[in-house]
Amino acid sequence: MDGRSASRSRFPDGFRILKGNQEFVTYPENSTVRVWYADTPWTYDAHHHSAVEIIMPLKGEVEYTVADFSYKVQSDEVLIVPPGWEHSLSMGENSARYLFLFEPEPIFGMRDMKLVESILKIPIYLSGQPELQESVRGLLTQVVSTYDKRDFLWNSLCYSILTHLYVRLGQVNMAHLLGKSVSRGARGDMEIIDSARVYIDNNYMRDLDLDDMSAFTGFTKCYFSRIFKQHAGTTFSEYLRDKRVSVAAELLIHSKLQIQDIAAGAGFGSIATFNRVFMNAKSCTPSKYRSIYADLETEKT
């Protein structure tokens, strides 16, 4: 398969779509959570996607390679692969596992999750910590049960459990960041940056720049840039760009708006800029991105 076309594989619970080594994760209707079960030999080549991936073996082991590092995840362990990390996996005979995929924004977008930024963006291998492993696996088992039942608002309930999981990880592994060592001035800066993020989320369609953010926060442009990167884990321009791309991607999938109208509505100054930025972020053009998901909807029917 060449990098210009997308391949689709149908599974009992949906589809997986690959374009080159980029996977476009699909989900059940009105959700952004998917749980896959497998108990037969399975190999999946190197790929990356926008979703968080969690592997929970039930018996045997699942071998993962993440950024050239190998993990042999056992039946009492858990591996969490953050968005964007290239990874492959292999499962042999006499093994079984659950694989969880979910979009990170509902959890990672919470303000206080920035306090545990360092554990959200690198792989987390839970091994040799029996109490924590038992706790996390128990929460993942709750996700499986909720996913299988599909009661009303099951997607939101899954996210509440997954949020609990990340809170547990943060409390155990990043407790020193939540201590009293943060000065009162630093706490004040964090509150203002949190407000700035909300302001960006509500005004991404405008022609925002550092002058606007300086006026909003009362900080100089230089100081705002520095503490925004420090507290948000990304630069102002990167945060704004990612917000706009995320909004545009949703509109491409779930609306029939013209692409130029989507570009304008997401805050891009020109269709050329939109195409370039979207291509860099998603490794395909907006029109191709839309066609991939449109073709999937056709296959579903």
Image (spheres, helix red, strand yellow):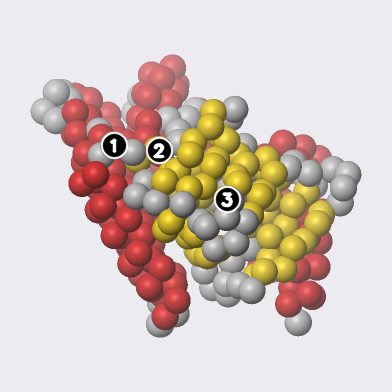
Mark closest to the chain's N terminus, 2 or 3 = 3
- Front-most of 193 and 67? 67
Looking at the figure, which quarter contains the C terminus? bottom right
- Kindly state the secondary structure of the residue where label 1 is placed: loop
51 is higher (above) or lower (below) than 252? above
Q: What residue is drawn where x is 52% and y is 57%?
A: 94
Q: What residue is drawn where x is 77% and y is 37%?
A: 276
- Kindly state the secondary structure of the residue where label 2 is placed: strand
Does residue 204 show up?
A: no
Q: Residues within 10 Å of mark 2 (few under 14, many from 20)?
A: some
Q: What residue is drawn where x is 58% and y is 51%?
A: 92
Q: Position of residue 245 (x, y in %)?
A: 63, 47
In three-dimensional space, the C-alpha distance between marks 1 and 2, rounded to whole angstroms, equals: 12 Å
Q: Residues within 10 Å of mark 3 (few under 14, many from 20)?
A: many
Residue at numbered disc 3: 91
Residue at numbered disc 2: 124
**Residue type for callout 2:** Ile
Residue farthest to the front?
94
Tell me, yes or no, whether the two marked residues, 2 and 3, touch with CB atoms within 8 Å: no
Residue at numbered disc 1: 128
- Front-most of 44 and 170? 44
